[in-house]
Image: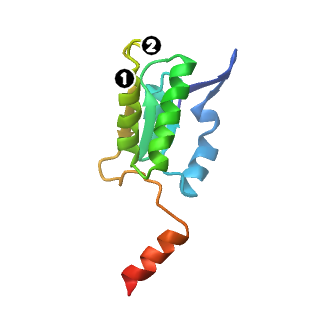
Amino acid sequence: MTGGEIVIAPNTALYLNEIQTPLTIAKENGLQVAIFNSCSGLSIANKLIDLGFSQVAIMREPIHNQVAVEFFMQFSQSLAEYKDVHQSLLAASEYLHQKNYIYPSSYLIPSLFRHPAADLFRIEPSGFKQLLKKSNQQL
């Protein structure tokens, strides 16, 4: 596995082949989706799909750090509202589209790569209310 550069600081980068083993272990331990939102992620997505990840959200081109922050805030808010990863990506992209005068065309850059047979990642509701709903449904 080659390529897939992740810049973590000025003049400092990791390549996915350097962290292939920890990524594989994370996937085996339940990691379901990978998100890389502040870099040119096409090669990263290809490498992660090759590693067996079923869902990878990336930016197709480099973006400004503030765009990455705003995208991630909207994306994570949608996930917290129990939307799936695709719905969350679309909601965050729509948010960027509404800010097109500030961040021109940035809404066109986010992409989701997914294995067709994979269920879309979604955070499942949990807590006392959910336990009550489940127990009432079983009665």
Could you say which quadrant of the image residue 6 lies in? top right
SS class, disc 2: loop
Quarter containing the C terminus: bottom left
98 or 72: nearer the viewer: 98
Residue at 53 percent of width and 16 percent of height: 64
Query: Which residue is the extreme one toward the bottom?
Result: 139
At label 2, counting other C-alpha atoms closer than 10 Å, the crowd grade (few under 14, some 14-19, many 20 or more) is few
Q: How far across and down, in percent of the image, does residue 18 sit?
A: 64, 34
SS class, disc 1: helix
Which residue corresponds to mark 2?
102
Q: How far across and down, in percent of the image, does residue 4 sit?
A: 53, 27
Residue 98 badge: 1
Marks 1 and 2 close (CB-CB < 8 Å) = no
82 or 22: nearer the viewer: 82
Kind of residue at badge 1: Gln
Tell me the CA gap for discs 1 and 2: 9 Å
Residue at 40 percent of width and 41 percent of height: 88
Is 47 rendered above or below residue 116? above
Query: Which residue is the extreme one toward the left?
Result: 116
19 or 89: nearer the viewer: 89
At label 1, counting other C-alpha atoms closer than 10 Å, the crowd grade (few under 14, some 14-19, many 20 or more) is few
Residue at 59 percent of width and 51 percent of height: 26
Is 88 rendered above or below residue 71? below
Q: How far across and down, in percent of the image, does residue 66 sit?
A: 55, 20
Question: How many numbered marks are there?
Answer: 2
Kind of residue at badge 2: Ile
Q: How far across and down, in percent of the image, does residue 83 sit?
A: 39, 49
